[in-house]
Amino acid sequence: MKPLIAVLPLLFVAAGVSAKTVPVTTDLAQQNTQAVLWMQHAGEYRALCYQAYNTAMMAFDAAKARNSGKLAVMVDLDETMLDNTPYAAWQIQQHKPYESASWNKWVNAVQTPALAGAVAFANYVTKQGGTMFYVSNRSVRTFEATKANLLQAGFPNVSDVTLRLKRETSDKAPRLQSIEADGYKVVLFLGDNLNDFPELNTYHQLNEVRNATVDAHQQAFGQRFVLLPNPSYGDWEPGLGKGYYQLSDEQKAQLRNNSLKPWNGQ
């Protein structure tokens, strides 16, 4: 009995540690529930979208006063101009991870609504003489559906020139360079992901570098870069650790849990 009694405290300690470090669920889609509910229902999220577009209008006006020539605004689409939370909600209820097949089916359904204030912002830039460039990492195979969706939602100046989807790489730097090569001066960027701002060079960087980059460019946010909120997904997630996309769902869930910065309870 004495050896057993001596071991029992260790077992309770181990159980306590395990309870703190093992994630509640390894269903990654289910972990997204709170974020998607917030984006679909919270007035705070809607207010932040309006705030971002209002800021962007003022930033464009200021840039127009300082610059001449063919001025352009480069915007991302998903969770910047368009709202894909219906797809995310479907993933949650069907226990489905992100898959290109189901994503492309959603895109080709041409049912993606515009975010509140997005169309008004795009029309404002256009009326002020600027050119909207819609630069998305949707596959070029969904070009026609994406173009139809934008036109259906009321976005202006959507064409084979202004809509630039992913062909070979999700890095948007080459597409920014192609816009500039066409004689445009991009004076403002909108996105929900730091990678939507190619000048920051955060592509495939871990979060330590991404955060340091934000700190180094803090004065540019709200002036050259305007960020929309997106707690649902983004490149901050693979930024949690090297080789993130090679991990199993269980390993990803564990890494997410281990990356939390908790209070010690005292």
Image: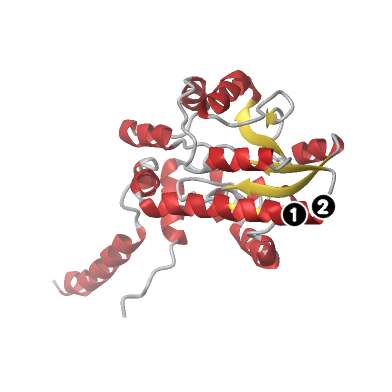
Give the percent coordinates (x, y) of residue 260. Answer: 43, 62
Q: Tell me which amino acid carries mark 1.
A: Ala
* Residue 93, quarter of the rendered image: top left
Q: Nearer the viewer, residue 171 or 4?
A: 171
Residue sitting at x 35%, y 53%: 23
The residue singled out by tag 1 in the image is 63
Q: Residue furthest front?
A: 127
Query: In this orientation, which residue lies closer to the viewer: 183 or 204?
Result: 183
Quadrant (top left/top right/bottom left/bottom right) for the C terminus: bottom left
Q: Which quadrant of the structure image shows residue 133?
A: top right
Looking at the image, do the residues carrying marks 2 and 1 touch, with CB atoms under 8 Å apart? yes
Secondary structure found at label 1: helix
Q: Quadrant of the N terminus?
A: bottom left
Q: Is residue 253 above or below residue 5?
A: above
Say which mark, if any, is on residue 49. none
Label tally: 2
Closer to the camera in the image, 153 or 168: 153
Please name the residue shown 55% across and 40% down the image.
Answer: 120
Q: Residue 42: image x %, image y %?
A: 35, 50
* 12 left or right, relative to 266: left
Residue at (65% x, 46% y) in the render = 196
| Residue 153 higher or lower than 227, as above or below | above
Colouring rule applied to residues: secondary structure
Q: Residue at label 2?
A: 67
Tag 2's secondary structure? loop
Q: Position of residue 228 (x, y in %)?
A: 54, 50
Q: Is 81 left or right of 210, judged from the image as shown?
A: left
